Image (spheres, rainbow, N blue to C red):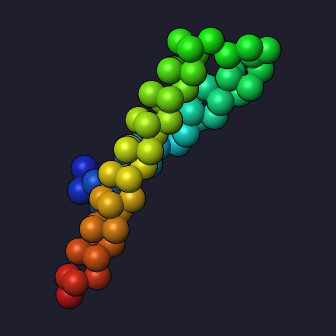
């Protein structure tokens, strides 16, 4: 597999999003398993949720630009 193919298929960003989604799910499971959520735990969940939202928005924006550029090439 050449670096151009790896870049075209965007394997690394997709793997990173899968890993981040897994970590996010684990954080939510942790929060739901606690009988009482402290302010520190709630802050952790809030920061992880914000990071996930931002990274997902960047990922989707990058994917849409990549698709439109590929279609414009003859």
Look at 65% across and 30% down and name the residue there: 28
Between residues 59 and 28, which one lies in front from this camera angle?
A: 28
Which residue of the protein is positioned furthest toward the bottom in this rendering? 74
In the picture, residue 38 is in which quadrant? top right
Q: Give residue 35's position: percent from left, percent from top.
A: 79, 14
In the picture, residue 12 is in which quadrant? top left
Number of numbered discs: 0
Between residues 42 and 53, which one lies in front from this camera angle?
A: 42
Which quadrant is the C terminus positioned in?
Answer: bottom left
Look at 32% across and 60% down and name the residue there: 61
Between residues 31 and 10, which one lies in front from this camera angle?
A: 31
Q: Give residue 70's position: percent from left, percent from top.
A: 27, 75
Look at 33% across and 51% down and name the residue there: 58
Q: Does residue 51 show up?
A: yes
As displayed, is residue 43 above or below residue 58?
Answer: above
Q: Does residue 15 show up?
A: no
Q: Give residue 43's position: percent from left, percent from top.
A: 50, 20
> Is residue 24 shown left or right of residue 16?
right
As displayed, is residue 50 above or below residue 31?
Answer: below
Q: Give residue 52's position: percent from left, percent from top.
A: 46, 39
As displayed, is residue 24 above or below residue 41?
Answer: below
As displayed, is residue 9 above or below residue 13?
Answer: below
Look at 38% across and 44% down and name the residue there: 55
In the picture, residue 31 is in which quadrant? top right
Which residue of the protein is positioned furthest toward the front in this rendering? 39
Which residue of the protein is positioned furthest toward the left in this rendering? 73
């Amino acid at each position: 597999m050449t670096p151009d193919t790896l870049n075209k298929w965007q394997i690394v960003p997709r793997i990173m999003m899968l890993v981040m989604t897994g970590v996010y799910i684990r954080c939510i499971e942790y929060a739901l398993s606690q009988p009482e959520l402290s302010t520190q735990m709630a802050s952790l969940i809030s920061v992880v949720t914000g990071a996930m939202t931002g990274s997902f928005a960047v990922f989707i924006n990058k994917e849409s630009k990549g698709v439109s550029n590929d279609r414009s090439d003859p």
